[in-house]
Amino acid sequence: MMTPVLLLALMLACVGPVPPVEPACPHSVDGWFGGAVGRLVLAGQGGAFASAAAEPWIESREGGWSHLGDGFVASTRYAEGYFLVREEACGGGELHANGDYDLAWGLRTVDALGQEEGARVEQSRRGCRVQGSAFAGADRVSTVSEIVDESTVRGLITSTASDFDVTATWRADHSAELIYDGHDGESWYEVEEPGDGTRQASFHLSYDGGTEDGGYERSFDGAREYRFDRFPDSGEWSVMHIWWLLFYDGSGQGEVVGQALDGSSLTCWYEWDADGVGSYSCDDGTSGPY
């Protein structure tokens, strides 16, 4: 009579070792791409993670799967002084053995003003292609990305709430380049994020009434400093040179130098609070509420 041990040995001999699963994409980017969800993919179904983040604007990430492996929670804590405070995800889905996945989660983001925003996110990966959609009310943001190599991901972002399509390149050093192409065929933004939580942008905007050319810099705390020229299609001004400093709470200050068609110029200074209430004064002696 065959013993259970001998029977098991014969079964293993017939089956042989299980061959490793070939990755659907040869490039691994989950360590730097995808935020907390990328870390969940690295942890594997049933796993957990908790670690400081390499990005200067993020303090830490942590999260994990349920003991059944069908649900997960993940949170991101942003660094002190950044314009976002925390982000929380709760969802579920399936991780496939070859690295592909199908995930969906609810997302809640809290900023430095205590304001909350929510969204529903769906994301999947097949091979080196990552596709996802985020839904907030009636708005939808869709992203189709391609993993180029271990340190580069490129994607196209479209939104039902935006007049621009965005071509993005994300890099392992946490820098990014984003090109905004306007649906009008003329307007554009070119944005560079150096990987320190700030960004610089240049733009050309066309709209009813004129055009604008210039750029802005966004600081770590979310403030934006704009410098641009406005060229009206009509009126008394040939060009207006504009400087705006917009703080994250909505308050700000600015200066406008208008050059008239007759060659004269006028300079005005503006200041307003977080509710948009302010005043102006000009070098011709005029002033008033703004």
Image (cartoon, rainbow, N blue to C red):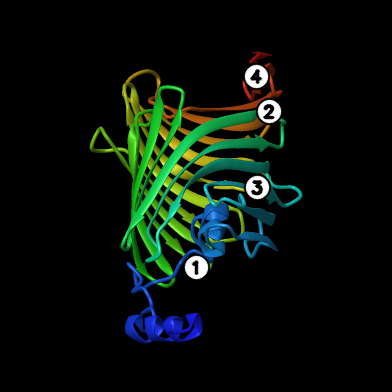
Q: Which mark is residue 137?
A: none
Q: Residue furthest right?
A: 80
Is 260 placed left or right of 250 in the picture? Answer: left
Provide residue 286's location: percent of width, then percent of height.
64, 15
- Single out the mark in the foreground, 1 or 4: 1
- Single out the mark in the foreground, 1 or 2: 1
At horizontal 67% and vertical 55% (from top left) the residue drawn is 62
Which of these two is toward me, 268 or 18? 18
Q: CA distance from mark 1 to mark 2?
A: 35 Å
Q: CA distance from mark 3 to mark 2?
A: 30 Å
N-terminal of the two: label 1 or label 3? 3
Which of these two is toward me, 271 or 175? 175
- Single out the mark in the foreground, 4 or 3: 3
Q: CA distance from mark 1 to mark 3?
A: 21 Å
Which of these two is toward me, 130 or 222? 130
Q: CA distance from mark 4 to mark 3?
A: 33 Å
Report crowding for label 3: few under 14, some 14 to 19, many 20 or more residues within 10 A (C-alpha).
many
- Single out the mark in the foreground, 3 or 2: 3
Q: Which secondary structure, mark 2? A: loop
Residue behind mark 3: 75
Report crowding for label 2: few under 14, some 14 to 19, many 20 or more residues within 10 A (C-alpha).
some
Q: Residue furthest left?
A: 185
Labels 1 & 3 near each other (Cβ < 8 A) = no
Going by the numbered disc 1, the residue's amino acid type is Ala
Residue behind mark 2: 251
Residue behind mark 4: 276
- Single out the mark in the foreground, 1 or 3: 3
